[in-house]
Image (spheres, rainbow, N blue to C red):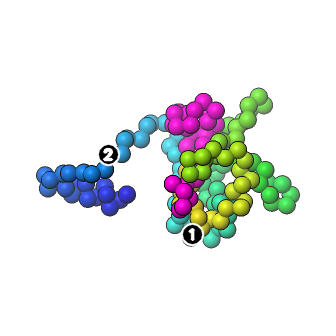
C-alpha cells in the first residue's frame, strides 16, 4: 500500500500521473479513530492465538474469560449500560462471526490485521447492530 502511495505521489510530481487502481476514498471522520494491530506487531508480541492478539489493541477492549482462561466475550471499555449489551460485533474476512470464542482456535500467525472500528464508521460499515463497534479481523488467506 505504501509503495502504491509513494509511486502515485512521485508520478503526480513528475506530471505523468496514470493510475490503474481506483483511488482509496478518504476515511470518514468518526468520534473515535479506529485502532489497528498488524501482523508484524502480532509476530513481535509472540502471541499464540487471535484471541490473545486482541489484547494488543490496548485498553480499548476488555476481554472476559472464565477461571480456566477460556474466552467468554468482549466489551468496549468505558461504555456500560444495564439495558444494552456493549459487545462489539466480530467480522472475519468479511463474514460476521457470532461468538468471540472461535478466536481461541485461530493461530495468531494467520492474522494479517485486527482493527477496532467504533462510532458512526462501525454503523456505516456493518449496520445499526454494530453500534457498539466492530472488531474486523483479516487473515492472510481470507481477504
The CA distance from mark 2 to mark 1 is: 30 Å
Q: Quadrant of residue 46?
A: bottom right
Query: Which comes sooner in the sequence, label 2 or label 1?
Result: 2
Task: Residue 26: give x, y in percent of width and height.
Answer: 37, 41
Count of numbered circles on the image:
2
Depicted 89 relative to depicted 36: above or below = above
Front residue (pair 15, 22): 22
Task: Residue 110: give x, y in percent of width and height.
Answer: 59, 64
Q: Quadrant of residue 87?
A: top right
Task: Residue 133: give x, y in percent of width and height.
Answer: 61, 40
Q: Is residue 98 rendered to the left or right of residue 25?
A: right
* Circle 2/circle 1 CB separation < 8 Å: no
Q: Is residue 48 among what the camera can see?
A: yes
Q: Residue at x 67, y 61 (%)?
A: 106
Neighbour class for label 2 at 10 Å: few (<14), some, many (≥20)? few
Question: Would you name the residue on which mark 2 appears?
Answer: 23
Q: Is residue 77 rendered to the left or right of residue 39?
A: right
Question: Would you name the residue on which mark 1 appears?
Answer: 43
Q: Is residue 37 among what the camera can see?
A: no
Neighbour class for label 1 at 10 Å: few (<14), some, many (≥20)? some
Q: Residue at x 64, y 56 (%)?
A: 54
Q: Quadrant of residue 65?
A: bottom right
In this view, the mark in front (2 or 1): 2
Element carrying mark 1? helix
- Quick check: is 126 in the magenta stretch? yes
Depicted 40 relative to depicted 33: above or below = below
Q: Residue at x 51, y 33 (%)?
A: 124
Bounds of the magenta span?
116-143
- Quick check: is 2 in the magenta stretch? no
Q: Which mark is residue 14?
A: none
Task: Residue 86: give x, y in percent of width and height.
Answer: 70, 37
Amino acid at each position: 500500500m505504501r509503495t502504491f502511495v509513494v509511486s502515485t505521489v512521485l508520478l503526480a510530481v513528475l506530471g505523468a500521473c496514470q493510475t490503474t487502481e481506483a483511488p482509496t476514498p478518504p476515511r470518514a471522520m468518526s468520534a473515535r479513530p479506529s485502532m489497528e494491530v498488524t501482523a508484524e506487531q502480532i509476530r513481535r508480541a509472540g502471541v499464540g492465538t487471535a484471541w490473545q492478539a486482541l489484547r494488543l489493541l490496548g485498553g480499548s477492549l476488555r476481554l472476559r474469560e472464565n477461571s480456566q482462561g477460556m474466552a467468554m466475550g468482549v466489551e468496549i471499555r468505558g461504555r456500560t449500560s444495564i439495558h444494552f449489551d456493549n459487545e462489539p460485533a466480530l467480522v472475519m474476512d468479511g463474514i460476521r462471526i457470532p461468538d468471540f470464542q472461535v478466536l481461541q482456535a485461530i493461530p495468531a500467525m494467520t492474522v494479517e490485521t485486527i482493527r477496532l472500528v467504533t462510532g458512526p464508521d462501525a454503523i456505516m460499515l456493518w449496520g445499526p447492530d454494530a453500534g457498539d463497534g466492530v472488531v474486523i479481523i483479516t487473515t492472510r488467506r481470507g481477504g
